[in-house]
Amino acid sequence: MGTYRYVALGDSFTEGMVDERPGGGYRGWADRLAEHLAAAGEEDGTVVEYANLAVRGRLLPRIAAEQVPRALDLRPDLVSLIGGGNDLLRPRADPDALAQVLEDAVRRLRAGGAAVLLATGTDPAAAPLLRRTRGAVGVLNAHVWSIAQRHGCAVLDLWGLRAVADRRCWGEDRIHMTAEGHRRAALAALDALGRPVPAGLSAAERDYRTPLPVAVPVPRREALAADLRWSRVHLLPWVRRRLRRTSSGAERTGKLPEPVPVPR
């Protein structure tokens, strides 16, 4: 019997938006991954401890400056470090500079003895707000694979996970994954780490690659109404925050700053 400690770093994706828990707050792929690790560890008596330092809206340099040192203090066995998506939404984003920040952070984590899980960005080709960032996302993704190869990291390949390109895997804001998207991402992460899927899951619950059934076409009028509502409820507030140089997570801290045992 031993203890295995997992610390999750990043932004809103790793915080878990918009995978809501019934009692409040967000679950998300990292929570789900910790649960899978704990379930698998039950077979040999391993206790999995989990901390989540991710904060919505965080830019990669701030993740590296604030969350990475805290993670090292916690002496983790595994760290997931995923960021850069918010940075690439900025007009003068430089994916090459972001890659340097990422690699420096990875180097520190690996020197501290932790295994590291990175991730590629999803393909934004079908996302109205994000489509213009596709080239920059592709460049940063290429860097992620190279960094992983140089430092022996695992990679959660969200770009290659075509099943999450389905609009039903994305929330109303069209930026954050639904529970289904997070479910699939967690299983893909488990696979990337080379870990077995817990035996208690059914075949359907284990499957993360098969696309959802073909959706019923949405009438043009309904689609237009949804686009208008999205612009009013989500796009305009986002633009206002950019103009004011504020963040949705400005006053927030990580949702789980201290490691806790994950129920098995």
Image (cartoon, helix red, strand yellow):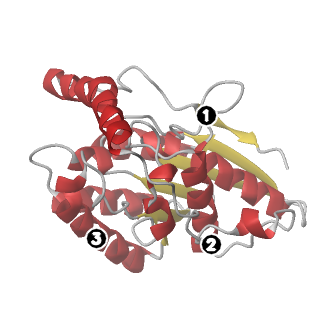
Q: Which amino acid does label 3 sit on?
A: His
At horizontal 78% and vertical 70% (from top left) the residue drawn is 203
**In the picture provided, is 3 more to the left or to the right than 59?**
right
Q: Distance between the residues labelled 3 and 2?
A: 21 Å
State whether residue 100 appears in this view. Answer: no
- Disc sitting over residue 60 in the figure: none
At horizontal 77% and vertical 45% (from top left) the residue drawn is 262
**In the picture provided, is 91 more to the left or to the right than 36?**
left
Q: Earlier in the sequence, mark 1 or mark 3?
A: 1
**In the picture provided, is 108 more to the left or to the right than 262?**
left
At horizontal 28% and vertical 30% (from top left) the residue drawn is 228
Badge nearest the viewer, 3 or 2: 2
Q: Which amino acid does label 1 sit on?
A: Glu
Q: How far apart are marks 1 and 3 (CA)?
A: 32 Å
Q: Which of marks 3 and 2 is nearer the N terminus?
A: 3
Badge nearest the viewer, 1 or 2: 1
Q: Is 257 or 240 nearer to us in this picture?
A: 240
Mark 3 = which residue?
A: 143
Mark 1 = which residue?
A: 20
Q: Which of marks 1 and 2 is nearer the N terminus?
A: 1
Mark 2 = which residue?
A: 191
Q: How far apart are marks 1 and 2 (CA)?
A: 24 Å
| Rendered view: 64 above or below 77 | above
Badge nearest the viewer, 1 or 3: 1
- Quadrant in the rendering for residue 250: top left
Q: Which amino acid does label 2 sit on?
A: Asp
**In the picture provided, is 69 more to the left or to the right than 52?**
left
